[in-house]
Image (cartoon, grey):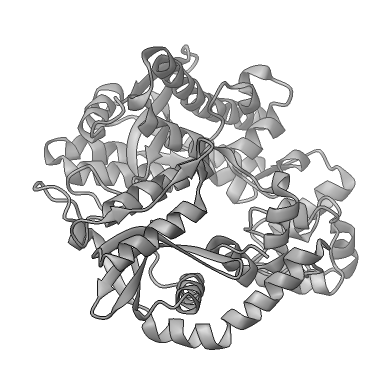
Amino acid sequence: MYLSKSIYVRVWSCPKGAWINRYHPEAVPQGEGKLARFRTGDEVGELARGLFGPSVNVTAYKDGDKLDLSRMIERTRREMDQGTPVICEASFSFEGLYCAVDLLKKEGDGWAIYEVKSSGDGLQDKYIADVSYQKYVLEHCGVKVTGVYLVCIDSSYVLGPEGLDVHRFFQINDLWEPACQAQESTVPLVLREAERVLESGEEPAVELSENCKDCELFSYCGRDLPSPNVFDLYRLQKKKMIEYYRQGLVSFADLERAGVIKNATQKRQIDFALHDRGIYADKEAIRAFLAGLSYPLYFLDFETMQPAIPFCVGTHPFAQIPFQYSLHFIERDGGALQHAEFLAESGTDPRRAISEALCRDIPADACVTAFNKAFECTRLKELAAAFPDLSDHLLAIEGNIIDLLTPFQKGWYYRREIGGSYSIKSVLPAICPNDPELDYHQLEGIHNGSEAMSIFPEIRFMPPEERDRARRNLLAYCRLDTLAMVRVWEELKKITD
């Protein structure tokens, strides 16, 4: 049996997930978001190599981009014999168990394991599982392990004008005690489970749990569930989902017969799905909402990136940095629909330029709408704090934003096609079906915010033709977000006429 540390952690986390990864890899979502996370991991890992001075990287390849594990293991042993202070990707194998240590540091008469994670979420059980497996493999290879550490990002770090301080950017956490405990109590159990699950070829029978709904493999594991089902209910607590599921209340018909759903919004979702009620509209509430809008009327949407390694002075790791907006607007009742937009240059700090563009394109006293306005409002407040000379105008825009999500979130408008999500990408096709102009799937290259976030930082590395195409795709995607808002507003107006 071959087992890497990543496969080990998968088995520890969910044996069925590990089995799917091995026997049905086509069921594992890929996409630009996952590739971007891998790139971020590589960037953070490269940065961490500067924590302890000069180091030697033993990574070796064969057949192009395939890792040559045998050469890496041989190189590791040679560097250890020479007493190299820090070895990157130090590689070891014991009876089919393989691991590569991010940073192996000489420490007295032994070696310390440093596992680098490109996250700022602190200590987690999965990290302990990871390092305990590494300690197990190294010690069975005859290595004296003198320390076990987790290197993760300090999310409170703020980039100063002097540049990145790698020692303040990272947190180093001592995991010796939990790693020793896990190595003794957990590692042997997981290894036996790995052999049972991965060698048999038979899909493990694992019951759905609270963690499954947010797992990337849920569509595979839940493929036999009726549609719609209890996991599709709007804002139903995960604990309740599993409770009903285990009681056999899985389909909407099951839930309706049992009468267990009391929330009005959830009851309406079930009722409309089963009986096709058409459109529900609380016209009085919607009219009151629309009466709060005024001309000139603006529809605003931001796109942002979240760099793990901050490059904008005054920002912290994973800060939301707006680099683009789309703006549809109507100056007066019956006026023409107009459009403005902004897209920063990739590789630059976009905040000043986007702030100035916002102040140019949106009057301080204008009525502005956003879909789920908390996001746009928070970004505007952050920009105002960064640029005091523009803060009055930016905060005026923020103070005038009205949330176009409200009529849907409050349950004033509903139709069967919306299902259990009130995101713009669920509401739009429900009210404007079969309109190719409003179909996100028809867009080229970028179909959601995650793809936009991933692609924008890469534009600076693209050749000119590819760069121009990527910018066009970004503009088209963001433009559709605000055009969608316009169409939603028009539907609300029509339903109350």
Query: Is residue 128 rendered to the left or right of residue 399?
Result: right
Query: Is residue 87 rendered to the left or right of residue 65?
Result: left
Q: Give the vertical position of 150 relative to 64 (above or below).
A: below
Q: Which of these two is toward me, 461 or 92?
A: 92
Q: Give the vertical position of 135 relative to 281 (above or below).
A: below
- Residue 264 in the image: state x and y as whole percent: 71, 59
Tally the marks: 0
- Residue 176 in the image: state x and y as whole percent: 37, 82
- Residue 292 in the image: state x and y as whole percent: 46, 38
Q: Which of these two is toward me, 93 or 242?
A: 93
What is the quadrant of the C terminus in the image?
A: top right
Q: Is residue 120 visible?
A: no
Q: Give the vertical position of 449 relative to 440 (above or below).
A: below
Q: Give the vertical position of 467 relative to 481 (above or below).
A: above
Residue lying at 51% horizontally and 25% vertically, measured from the top left = 477
Q: Which picture quadrant has residue 4?
A: bottom right
- Residue 274 in the image: state x and y as whole percent: 87, 49
What is the quadrant of the N terminus in the image?
A: bottom right
Query: Is residue 324 rendered to the left or right of residue 427?
Result: left
Query: Is residue 32 rendered to the left or right of residue 385?
Result: right
Q: Which picture quadrant has residue 153?
A: bottom left
Q: Which of these two is toward me, 260 or 310?
A: 310
Residue lying at 68% horizontally and 70% vertically, measured from the top left = 194
Residue lying at 86% horizontally and 55% vertically, measured from the top left = 224
Q: Which picture quadrant has residue 30?
A: top right
Residue lying at 51% horizontally and 83% vertically, measured from the top left = 183
Q: Is residue 361 visible?
A: yes
